[in-house]
Amino acid sequence: MVTQPEPGVFCAFRKQCPHAGRPVDEVSRRGIRCPAHGSMFDLATGEPKNGPAGKPLRAAKVRVDGERIIITG
Ligand code: FES
């Protein structure tokens, strides 16, 4: 899951929700939302903004190469 919390800044997170393992699937200005039970995570840090999740999404490494966004780890 790739986000752009501010212009030119890209962050990436594993899709597995730390609450019960379902995949997060929605990104909006408010955050990254898990459809299973409604947890919302911060676009820049992956920290939960509201539960039931109590832990952040796992971050992935991201690199920008021209117009491409590459997940590196
Ligand atoms: S599995 Fe994501 S909020 Fe429950």
Image: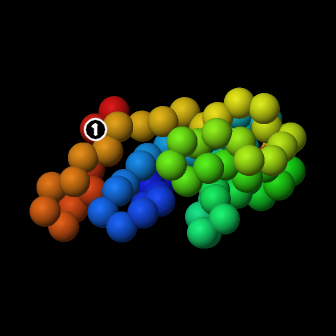
State the residue in front, 21 or 46: 46
Q: Residue at x 42, y 37 (%)?
A: 60
Q: Residue at x 71, y 30 (%)?
A: 55
Q: Please tell me in which quadrant of the rendered image residue 35 appears.
A: bottom right
Q: What residue does disc 1 label? A: 72
Query: Of 71 and 54, which appears nearest the observer?
Result: 54
Asked whether residue 34 appears in the rendered view, the answer is yes
Residue at the extreme left of the image, as rendered: 66
Coordinates of residue 49 in the picture (x, y in percent): 74, 47
Q: Is residue 26 visible?
A: no
Location of residue 49 with respect to 33 vertically, above or below: above
The picture quadrant where one finds residue 27 is bottom right
- The quarter of the picture where the C terminus appears is top left
Whether the residue under disc 1 has CB within 8 Å of ligand 1: no
Between 44 and 59, the one nearer to me in the picture: 44
Amino acid carrying label 1: it is: Thr
Relative image position of residue 47 (x, y in whole percent): 64, 39
Ligand 1: image quarter = top right
Q: Position of residue 58 (x, y in %)?
A: 54, 33
11 versus 55 height, above or below: below
* Residue 2 left/right relative to 73: right
At x 54% / y 42%, what residue is drawn?
45
The residue depicted at 24 percent of the width and 46 percent of the height is: 63
